[in-house]
Image: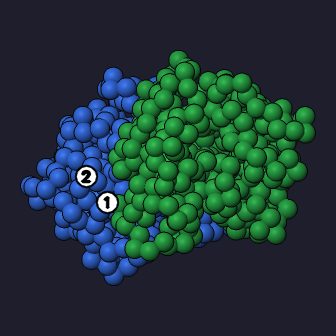
Chain colours: A green, B blue
Amino acid sequence: MIQKVSSAAALSEVVRPTTMLDAPRLSKLLAVDLRIASETFQHTGSFKFRAAYNLVSNVPQSEIITASSGNFGQAIAYACNLLGKRCTIVMPSTSARVKIDAVREYGGAVDLVDVREKSRQQRVSELALEKPSAFVASAYDDDYVIEGNASLGREICSVGIDFDVVVAPVGGGGLTSGIIMGIRQSGKNMKVIGAEPLLANDAARSLKAGRLIKNETEPLTIADGARTVGLGERNWRILRDGISGIVEVPEDRILEGVRALFSLANLKVEPTGALAVAAVMTNRELFRRRKVCCVVSGGNVDPDTYAAILKGDH
Amino acid sequence: MIQKVSSAAALSEVVRPTTMLDAPRLSKLLAVDLRIASETFQHTGSFKFRAAYNLVSNVPQSEIITASSGNFGQAIAYACNLLGKRCTIVMPSTSARVKIDAVREYGGAVDLVDVREKSRQQRVSELALEKPSAFVASAYDDDYVIEGNASLGREICSVGIDFDVVVAPVGGGGLTSGIIMGIRQSGKNMKVIGAEPLLANDAARSLKAGRLIKNETEPLTIADGARTVGLGERNWRILRDGISGIVEVPEDRILEGVRALFSLANLKVEPTGALAVAAVMTNRELFRRRKVCCVVSGGNVDPDTYAAILKGDH
């Protein structure tokens, strides 16, 4: 039931508004005044559609190549479908099955790569040589991506609540840098705090060092949306002064966050989507009694993985 | 973070608007033009808050006694908490653990009954004798309940889509009779079709017979919100002419519905909440290519039960 967009409609006309939820029982558990901005019901099930649509509708090329652990791939595939363009998505062979299937269902070509042998970027470079007329898209280090994600920051500013802090996951930094941009565009003064897996804490280390530090390899955190070697250059330029801090979240907290969102907010989230709530659980003093907006970035998770997390087997 | 309502605020000011979702992948699977009206993010996680708040705010008594498989109990407990009243909730000892815990967390007293030995109604009658000043509330056979649920019908009529049919679960008939009332109040002409577990098909049998037929005992369907012995008298008077049909849903379809909503709509639902989608799966010809609004009635399900359903072990 995909309906083609006749000409490039503005992002604001195509994007689904974020789903703002208050969850009093979760609020009580976390000892904060909590709202959840859930992107699980966004097109393709994650915030990535904002970036992808903005990018695909603005570049002149009719073919897109990108590397993606899955959600950006789905989003690019769907945006290309809406806009009558083609794409190839390079994905790690360890990606969640549902994400691979979804890219194909939206009409994208999937190119699987064993990241222990070859990085996704290497494979993208190979494909770019084969298809010289294609646009090579970064999932985060791109002005269209950041501007697309800024739409979420503006939405958060428009709900009529003066949040003390917005908490959002950090992988390549596309989401947090976009939210910071959107808040600035709205003339508001909300703080943004990043929620990063401890296993993939390059952004936290970069912030402490005052310079961009990368991971040696893609870290195997359960939060597969944050399996990036480092922040993008454009994201870093925004984050180094714009972000108020980063909470490094242990893996077991991420799982606890998934379970708490299930039990206390009726929300199905992927592990990366639980990072913000898990960050509040990890550093309770930082958030106590504040007005907090936790961004749930996406909901795409394999049923087997999710069932194992619920049963405490993961 | 429960905030007391100073005086009885109108239901429309307190209720959360239903969450309207379009789910293109699920739409495609079902071969209908689908919207989901999800009550999983309603206060207390189900539509029952609409009825409960309307009832508690309108009756003069300061104490409520009711029988409930859980969601109405949570809703009454929370409504009483908001309005400064007390309640006792009679629940089957087989109720989902999360529902028992939640009633207590909202401040309600729980009275567990083994329904193989004594019906919930018998236990309610005993309690009513002990507490003569309390109001004994029916979860469905009550004008305040029906009028509370009518608010959902009016909301569905207000979204700007002329649905051919609204599909909603049938237990005691409180939800479907309320939706029919709400649609009539809106001056619209949408059909309402009930989704009833085949194991608990008293409403379907009543409609065929043209008279109210009850189950011998509470049927043990996985859809625990529909474990009722029969429709209420008030509900039957509305449904016998007002409902366009009832689809009898086998248990395995209910489970399939839960899994489809997980995988294709990122929605966590309780088994009763999947009945409407499962009804479309059960009788595809009835709905093919129609504009269908499936009501997801609630999301409160034990993590172990949910994990077992996802893994296909249930």
Q: Which residue is mark 1?
A: A1
Q: Which residue is mark 2?
A: B30
Position of residue B35 in the picture relative to residue A289 (left or right): left
Label 2, secondary structure: give it. helix
Q: Report the residue at 30% width, 70% height from top.
A: B163
Residue occupying the point 90% across, 34% down: A209
The nearer-to-camera label among 2 and 1 is 1
Camera-side residue: B254 or B1? B254
The amino acid type of the residue labelled 2 equals Leu
Q: Position of residue B277 (x, y in %)?
A: 30, 50
Is residue A128 visible to the viewer in this orientation of the structure?
yes
- Local secondary structure at mark 1: loop
Taking the view exactly as shown, the residue that stands out farthest to the left is B209
Chain containing mark 1: A
Residue found at the far top of this picture: A313
Name the quarter where the C terminus of chain B is drawn. top left
